[in-house]
Structures are given as C-alpha cells and as structure tokens.
Image (cartoon, coloured by chain):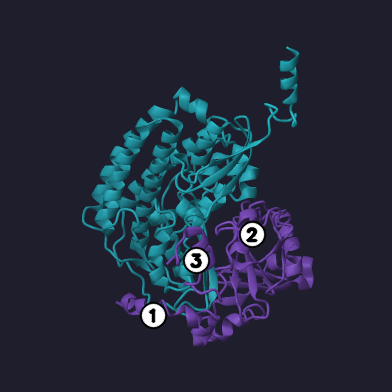
Chain colours: A cyan, B purple
Amino acid sequence: MNDLANTIDDRTPQRPDTLLGADELVINMGPQHPSTHGVLRVKLKLDGERVIGSECVIGYLHRGVEKIAENRSYQQFAPYVDRMDYVAAVSNGLGYCEAVEKLLMVEAPPRARVIRTILTELQRIASHLLWLGTHALDIGALTPLFYCMREREEILKIFEKYCGARLTTHAFRIGGLQYEAYDTLEKDVERFCRGFEARIQEYSDLLTGNSIWLGRTRNVGLLKAEDCIALGASGPVLRASGVKWDLRKAMPYAAYDQYKFEIPVGANGDTYDRYLVRIEEMRQSRLICLQAIENIPAGPIMARVGKVLKPPPGEVYHAIEAPKGILGYYIVSDGGTQPYRVRIRPPSFINLQALDKMIRGHLVTDVVAIIGTPDIVLGEVDR
Amino acid sequence: MADESKAPQSPESPKPAAPGPSAAPPAAGAPASLATKPVAPAAAASPPVQVPLDNELSRRYRERFGAAILDALEDRKQAILVVEALQFREVARYSRDAEKFDLLEDFTAVDWPRREKRFDLVAQLYSFPNNTRLRLKCALRAEEQADSLFSVWPAANWLEREIFDMYGIVFRGHPELKRILLPDEWQGHPLRKDYDILQQDTAWVRENLGIESGQ
C-alpha cells in the first residue's frame, strides 16, 4: 500500500494550477483536419481537455496575391481577387472594382450598380448557406448541409446563367458590367427568393430550438463587443456581440442606399448568436434582392473608362461589407498602368485573430464549433 | 483584346518596374514627392486629386502635435495625416482616445525604394461614433524600427507580423514578432520592390519541398 502511495506521490502535481496535475499538452489541430475548413493549423495548449492557450499557424495557401497585383494591369488583376474568398467571389470583385473606380474617379451607371447589388446579395446568401451547412456538420448535424447545398446550387445556377461561371465568377468589370442581365434574371431571382423564405424556416426548425444545437453553441466562444472592436473583428461576429453596425448602412456603396433592410444583432456574442445573426442576414439579403428586382433602371451598364487604365497618382481605400466582414482595398497608383500597391484587408484574416480569445477555457470539442463560427476561408486568410 | 496584347509583357515588366515608379514617366517625380508635398505635380493636367486638408480635425491634430504632423491632405476626399515616425504611436493613441477612432481597420506598408525614407506605414482608422475614416501615415528609413501599435489596438498584432513578414520592418514592443504567412526560415521580404515576382528562397524550397523550383 505504501509503495502505491509513493508512486502516486511521485506524480504529485508539478503545476498545481492545472486540473489533472499533469504537464500541459500541446496538440496540433490541422492543417489536415476536416473541421478547420481548409489548411488551418491550430496549436492547442491543453490542460486535460481544456484549452489554456492556442496559436494559429497560417500561410499554407499563401500565393502572394498582393505581389501579383503589382505586376498586372488593373483589369488583369480583377480575376485574382475571386480566388481569395472563393465562396464569395462576387463580393470580392465588387470591392475591387469599386475601389479602382474610386481611384479613377468614375462611377458605375445605376443599372450596373443595381445588378451588382442583386448578385452580391445572392452571393452573401450562398456564402452564409455554405457556412451554415458546414458549421452544422462540424457540430454533428448532417441534414442542414444537404439542404443548404440544395439552395446554394440555385444561386450558383443564376451566376452561371449570368456570367458562365459558378464559383470564381469575375462577374463585374471596372466601370460597370461586361454582361447585360440575361432575359429571365429577375424571374429567376424572384423564384428563388419566394421559395427561400420557407427554406430558411426549415433550417431554423432544424437548429434554432434544437437542444443539442443549443448545448453546443450557447455560451461557447464568447466575444464581447469591446473585444471585437479591439481585435478588429467585423461582420456577423461584430453584430452578434451587439454592435448594430453594417458598412452597407454606415457608408453605402453600390445601390444599398435605395433599399430597406434591418441590421440583425445578437445579445451575448456567442456561437449561437452568430448563427442567429447569419440566419437573419439571409432573410434581409432576400428582401434586398426582392426590392432590387422590382426596379432595375434602364441604361448603360458600363461607365466610360479607357481600355488602358491609368489612374492619376494617389491612393484610395475602399471597403465593403463582405459576407465575412469588412473587406477593404487600399490601392496606390503611381500613374502607371499597373497598381503600385494593392493592399487587401481580408475579413477572415483579422477575424481569425480573435480565435484565441474565443477558445480559451473551452473543451477541445468546442474548438471545432468555434473555428467554424467566425466563418473563415483560408484562401482569404493566406492570400 | 487589350488584355491579350499585355499578357506577354507582364513577365518581363517587373524588371523595369521593380526599382520604383520609373515605369511611368509622367509620374516619376510625383510619388517621390508625396511625402513632403501634398499636390503631385504630375496631376496638374487633370483636376487635382490631392488637396491640403484644413478642417477641424486636422487643426486639432496640429494643435496637439505641432510639427509632428508633417502633412495633412485629402486624396479623393479621404483624409490623410502624415506623421513623424517617432510620434506615430502617440498620435495613434490620441486618435483612439480623443478622436474616437476605435477601430484599426487596416495597417500596412508601401515600399518606395527611391525615397530617402523608404517605407510608408499606413494605418486605416475608423470611428464608430462618428462614422468617419482617417488614414495615418509615417515614413521610415530602410533599417529604421517602428513603434508597435499593439498596445493601442490589439488588432495590430497580426497586421504588424504581416508587415514584418512582407517588408522586414521591425516593430518595437510587439509581443511576438515573427513571420506569419511565410515559413519562419524564409529569406527575403517579398513585397519589397527589389524582390522580383519570380524570385523565391530556392534553398528553402529545395530543402523543404524537395524540388528545384516552386514555379
């Protein structure tokens, strides 16, 4: 007996502050882990199953997009931005085109701006749908993925009909649009939007009151509003923490100033609130699309811009509310045909910075839920 | 069509473009003088895009910091303050506390190899209460270190790591300054203008990927 007591004694905690009296354990999550949504590697420092620290290792998808920009003409670079947040390519393109338009001091014609708004809002729905499906899958709900993919497919078909591409669309051009809206665009969008209300209700029925869902997401990954702002987190993450702020309202671009919509906010800033905010955002996006197709102004779709773009020397910063948060472009021109510097402010990269704050104190199983909740796309984190 | 005719040109273009803004003759003088003169001379033909900024905001900054505010200008209706590098953090702190620019929206750098002060640090600030943006800039010499903004906005953490990674600018007071997107052992800072677009750390690629070239 004494011997046994001694052996146990030998293992007395060297660090009495850890739960099991054991040393901290460092494990790697990713880069090949299904729940990390790409090639994200998170080094977790664990006490038993509780996370006491973490570090993100990123850069596996780094392609040097900003360097490429300095070696392409303004138009040549436009398709590259689609490949950052590749599940919301239309939004990336909108931000870039509008930034260059600001640099050139031209404005896209009203018709182009309305069509841009419609496509961008559809893209927001598609992006949120993919997020919802995969996030629910991470937590163990298999069904929503199939539902979400089904509706996302309808949106991608609209994109395909409009510009021929589904994922990396390159839908917009600097100065407006290359393609006129196809004949049944309004009808297609309307059909989708009319049916979509019931679909959102379906997701909501599956998850919102589901006790497993509530148990896995409520009070998980809390982020207070001050922390969000200090860490730069934006988009649904910021709104879920109770900040009623949306760039579409604060500094309207495209045609957003013409439409009525609400900014959904959460109360606690947990994973569940972020889910509710995104569900409501899809409803609002649907309303914007319905308002926009009511009245698409006639007229040209392209502003007068030259074939060779030479913006006057200077710089401009333009940001839009992408599905993931503030997507900003800071472009410096030296008067030449190629940008002197293009800086992309990627929402995923900066939101990911808040991950450490969110997962501290949680269990490893919750980490899976929390990695999903800021809705990161590694193509954009790494650029 | 225009795009096609440009395509073959692009692989070669980094070479002339790399040393700096010389690629575009009419603008060659303009960017170099940006730091000191608000209005770019080359833009004289077209309507001026950069005008001196003289409003309540710039006056408050000038009153508070005097000569440390090197320049205040407006480019395409966006406010820019050029600040003495040594005062950059103080100006940032004042912006957050007194001017309510509570969000560091973005923080980045621009390389101007021909200037005496080679790097521009550029911070995009946003104020939630006032719904306004402000751009703070400061210029650094090639080996000069900058003060980290981490103590003002924790958001600067990864942004400064990215600047260090891409430009090699060292931030004093940063809690953990190391590369973020490139591997830790990588040699060189890719967004510097003297780093060619086809250049890479071939030794690293050979050693870690087992291939001769990453292209």
Q: Where does the image place residue A218, in percent across and percent down from the top left? A: 54, 29
Q: Earlier in the sequence, mark 2 or mark 1?
A: 1
Callout 1 crowding tier (Cα within 10 Å): few <14, some 14–19, many ≥20: few
Distance, label 1 to label 3, CA atoms, is 19 Å
Q: Where does the image place residue A222, in percent across and percent down from the top left? A: 59, 36
Q: Single out the residue that lies furthest toward the top.
A: A1
Q: Where does the image place residue A241, in percent across and percent down from the top left? A: 58, 40
A141 versus A235 height, above or below: above
The residue under label 2 is B160
Look at the numbered disc 1 and give the secondary structure of its residue. Answer: helix
The residue under label 1 is B9
Q: Amino acid at mark 3?
A: Glu
Q: Nearer the viewer, residue A214 or B203?
A: B203
Q: Amino acid at mark 2?
A: Glu
Callout 2 crowding tier (Cα within 10 Å): few <14, some 14–19, many ≥20: many
Are the residues flagged by discs 2 and 1 in contact, CB closer than 8 Å?
no
Callout 3 crowding tier (Cα within 10 Å): few <14, some 14–19, many ≥20: some
Look at the numbered disc 3 and give the secondary structure of its residue. Answer: helix
Q: Nearer the viewer, residue B209 or A31?
A: B209
Distance, label 2 to label 3, CA atoms, is 16 Å
Query: In this rendering, do the residues under marks 1 and 3 share a single chain?
Result: no
Q: Which residue is rendered at x = 36% and y = 44% of the image?
A: A286
Are the residues flagged by discs 2 and 3 in contact, CB closer than 8 Å?
no
Q: Which chain letter matches label 3?
A: A
